[in-house]
Image (cartoon, helix red, strand yellow):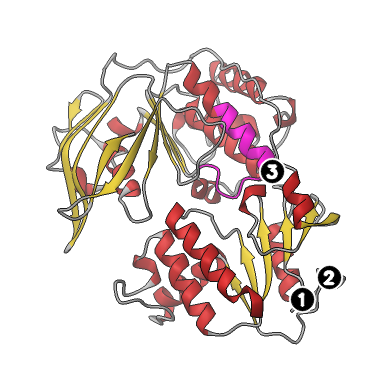
Amino acid sequence: MSQHIGLYLSNTSNKKLILKEILHNNFLNDYINIDALKGVLFSFITIEKMISEEFLHDKFIITTDENSSLSTMSSGQQRKALLAWQIAQKPEYMLLDDVYANVDKSTQEYIKTKLGEIAPKTQMIQVFFRRRDMLPFIDTVLTIDGNNKIMNAENSADFQKESYTGHEHKFYLPENFGATYANIDPLIELRNVSVKYEEKQVLTDVNWSIRQGEFWQMTGPNGSGKSTLVSMISGDNPKAYGQDMILFGRKKGSGETIWDIKKQIGYFTPLMIQRFTRTDSVENMIISGLNDSVGLYVEPTDLQKKVARNWLEMLGPTFRNKTFQQLTTGQKRMVMVARAMVKYPPLLILDEPTIELDDENSRLFIDMVNAIAFEKKVAIIYVSHRDEENLRPDKIYELVKTEKGGYTGRIV
């Protein structure tokens, strides 16, 4: 068995190109030769391709007893199903792409255990962004720079001796030049909220009150209803109708429009970035947050330009005079949060915001979130499976299994 290889990437590396080059045996020739081996790519990329096959050709490659298709599964269920299916193919090598992205702790342990069981007979190549994500059986770690070049090669023991701590970044938020909102407290009240999809109970008797300026982290296993809960708060889920919910001082279903709700929420999830393909400047991207538009289509006012430039000043000099597409992954996410914050909404929702961020950009992003929270002007719901060492929420709202079925919430 050849040595197991880990590739430690930064957000300036081109991961998709690296994966492609490895699969064509063009990247790791000095370390391993996989040219004659049968391999698989364990990646969200593979899951997306299989889901596309399901929709386009009604072809179900992977099914389980509980779910009819990949598209109906949670992120954790998708990863487990893919891993079981790929292991059954008896691959000679596995290319592992960010194996812990968007999965809960129990699924992370499951993945680590299953991969460890087959590692003695299977060549493993792991691509990862965070030092702590390195799998225990990796022998050699290659650090990759922004030009996809190998900067350093070292054994895993030496790699593990180092840890990324970084320095704390200071952010000073601009003052609010935007809209003013009614002084409502609490902002959100959920009373005995329960949700069922067909015969599947998802949420059961959820009670949650979110007050002005509070910083909440929401956690829970894959499939526990976190996305359902967020979509009900943000006005995107019709299951919210008929529930005992007060959103920004109004009872749900009392005649409010979805835009009445959305104008009071800043929202970011990494998937949003895929919608922004234009070559807008960073300044215009921030201004578009004032209009809740995907891009900027009207001439901004002098006040809007001033607001955007104040946020650019807060982000730092590396963001000036650049288009959104020229930024790194981490920088794009910071701009998207600035875009969500520019109107100073009463509530900011961040959904798994550090997925695929490297150590440096994760620290930068978390420091920015902490700075927003410190001002106590905006309430935050931070949804994540990952425990970020430097994140400082006021409270944690955890979704836990109930005896009745489905999940309910508790403050921990």
Q: Are marks 1 and 2 in contact (CB under 8 Å)?
A: yes
Residue at x-position 66% and y-position 42%: 359
Per the rendered image, the range of residues in magenta is 353-368
Seen in the image, is 175 located left or right of residue 78? right
- Quadrant including the C terminus: top left
Q: CA distance from mark 3 to mark 1?
A: 34 Å
Residue at figure coordinates x 85%, y 73% from the top left: 29
**What is the C-alpha distance between the residues marked 1 and 2?**
9 Å
Sequence-earlier tag: 3 or 2: 2
Residue type beneath disc 3: Thr
Furthest toward the bottom, the residue is: 36
Looking at the image, residue 237 lies above or below residue 116: above
Relative to 218, 353 lies left or right: right
Which residue does the numbered mark 1 point to in the structure image?
Answer: 2
Position of residue 113 relative to residue 233, above or below, is: below
Dot 3, crowdedness within 10 Å: few (<14), some or many (≥20)? some
Mark 3 vs mark 2: give the one in front: 2
Image quarter of residue 279: top right
Q: Is residue 362 visible?
A: yes
Determine which residue is flagged by label 2: 31
Looking at the rendered structure, the secondary structure element under dot 2 is: loop
**What amino acid is found at the position of numbered circle 2 in the picture?**
Tyr
Hey, what amino acid is under mark 1? Ser
Q: Tell me, for residue 328, which label it has, or none.
A: 3
Name the residue located 72 percent from the left edge and 69 percent from the top edge: 4
Query: Which quadrant would the N terminus be assigned to in this image?
Result: bottom right
Residue 211 in percent (x, y) is at: 30, 21
Mark yes or no: residue 93 visible: no
Choose the circle earlier in sequence order: 3 or 1. 1
**Relative side of 352 to 134, left or right:** left
